[in-house]
């Protein structure tokens, strides 16, 4: 099921007064996710370009070590972006299949406020807290 695209008025924000995940909500979050995705791609491309332009023949050992540390940080950031892009793509797929905005665990509404803060959220707040508690308990039991 592909959601129907709708025109949004300038400055549109989803409202609790509207039906949850109505076409306007879905289009709003689709645009939010697509904009975020493009920002990440642009930043990743900028990182790649910076690494390519960088002069490899750096003078002393300290500067070379500093440059290697910076490059390592840049590459870790790019890896985080890559993972985030995957989550954004999954969220866009959920918009298309009609499951966006609903908790994968409980089927309950995730909520507009939570989705505004984290548009790739897949769990409602209660389910997220249970998941985090479970992760902490598994970590503590090691």
Image (cartoon, helix red, strand yellow):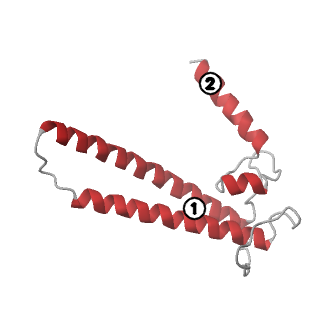
Image quarter of the C terminus:
top right
Residue at point 76%, 43% (across, down):
125
Q: Which residue is mark 2?
A: 138
Image quarter of the N terminus:
bottom right
Residue neighbourhood size for the residue with mark 1, other residues' Cα within 10 Å, grouped as few (<14), some (14–19), many (≥20): some
Q: Place residue 16 in its image quadrant.
A: bottom right
Residue 12 as seen in the image, left or right of residue 65:
right
- Please tell me whether mark 2 sits on a helix, a strand or a loop: helix
Q: Which mark is residue 70?
A: none
Q: Residue extending furthest bottom?
A: 7
Measured Cα–Cα span from mark 2 to mark 1: 29 Å
Residue neighbourhood size for the residue with mark 2, other residues' Cα within 10 Å, grouped as few (<14), some (14–19), many (≥20): few
Whole-percent x, y for residue 4 in the image:
74, 78
Q: Residue extending furthest top?
A: 141
Residue at point 73%, 74% (across, down):
3
2 and 1 marks in contact (CB < 8 Å): no
Residue 35 as seen in the image, left or right of residue 42:
right
Q: Which mark is residue 89?
A: 1
Whole-percent x, y for residue 85 in the image:
52, 58
Q: Is residue 137 above or below residue 38?
A: above
- Please tell me whether mark 1 sits on a helix, a strand or a loop: helix
Q: Is residue 135 above or below residue 22?
A: above
């Amino acid at each position: 099921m592909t959601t129907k695209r709708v025109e949004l008025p300038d400055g549109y924000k989803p409202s609790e007064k509207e039906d949850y995940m109505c076409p306007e909500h879905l289009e709003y979050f689709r645009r939010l996710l697509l904009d975020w995705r493009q920002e990440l791609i642009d930043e990743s491309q900028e990182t790649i370009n910076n690494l390519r332009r960088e002069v490899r023949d750096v003078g002393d050992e300290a500067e070379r070590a500093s440059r290697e540390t910076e490059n390592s940080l840049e590459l870790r950031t790019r890896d985080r972006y890559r993972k985030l892009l995957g989550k954004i793509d999954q969220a866009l797929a959920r918009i298309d299949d009609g499951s966006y905005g609903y908790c994968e665990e409980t089927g309950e509404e995730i909520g507009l406020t939570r989705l505004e803060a984290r548009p790739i959220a897949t769990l409602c707040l209660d389910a997220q807290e249970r998941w985090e508690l479970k992760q902490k308990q598994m970590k503590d039991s090691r």
